[in-house]
Amino acid sequence: MSKPSETDLYAPVKSWLEQAGYEVKSEVGPADVVALRAGQPPLIVELKAGFSLTLLQQAVARQAISDLVYVAVPRWSGKSGWRAFKGNVGLCKRLGVGVLSVRLKDGFVQVHTDPGPFQPRKSKVKSARLLSEFTRRDGDPNTGGTNGKVVTAYRQDAERLAACLAKEGPMKGAALAKATGVKTATRMMAINHYGWFERVERGVYGLTPEGRSALKD
């Protein structure tokens, strides 16, 4: 199947707009699609075969002409395509740009967001999580652009537990928490996210070979 082009999007978008009562023309001035309806400002649609920085720049530039600016792209394919598409919709909301997707096999046009001011909702949970991680993390062990290899406060706590077990041998969770200052010691070792800990007996944990290896690294 050949890659879709902007011209493949025009007919479905035009038909959708005409059904909504607009008169539609293409390639008017700098705009890919211009639609007019009595008593309303022009509606502009920028067509692209996929999301790109160029598409967003064009849409923002068209906002100098009208507040009613949409971008139209082919409908996504697969879960990864949907995730990328959803992220781009969120970005367009922040820019005040509407988003249309076109299902090319039957010309179905779907509106994912309309143009307009956008005020993002703040998440108290995410904010608290960020501040907690910042406060709990010891020093600044990471360098920007770590390619996913981030030393978190959780890992630092796990390293403290592992170092203490390597030095003292198997210990009860409560004693280990007191010795290291890691209040969640028992829970962390029970969950064993890194595979560093093993239960020696009820309430007592020791260090696995993986744990010893991680300390050397």
Image: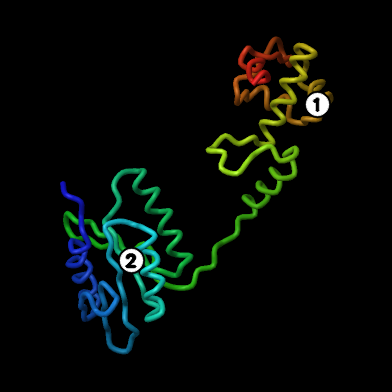
Q: Viewer-proximal residue, 183 or 44?
A: 44
Q: Secondary structure at mark 2?
A: strand
Q: Is residue 150 left or right of residue 9?
A: right
Question: Callout 1: 10 Å neighbours few (<14), some, many (20+)?
Answer: some
Q: Is residue 187 left or right of residue 40?
A: right
Quadrant housing the C terminus? top right
Say how the picture is coloured: rainbow
Residue drawn where x is 60% and y is 24% of the image: 194
Q: Is residue 192 left or right of residue 35?
A: right
Residue drawn where x is 60% and y is 20% of the image: 195
Residue drawn where x is 71% and y is 45% of the image: 134
Q: Is residue 119 above or below residue 152?
A: below
Which residue is situated farthest in the bottom direction here?
39
Residue 60 position by quadrant: bottom left
Q: Amino acid at mark 2?
A: Val
Q: Secondary structure at mark 1?
A: helix
Where in the figure is residue 174, as x and y percent of width and height? 80, 23
> Which label belongs to residue 180?
1
> Which label belongs to residue 25?
none
> Which label belongs to residue 71?
2
Where in the figure is residue 178, as x and y percent of width and height? 83, 25
Question: Callout 2: 10 Å neighbours few (<14), some, many (20+)?
Answer: many
Q: Is residue 117 above or below residue 135?
A: below
Q: Amino acid at mark 1?
A: Thr
Residue drawn where x is 66% and y is 48% of the image: 130
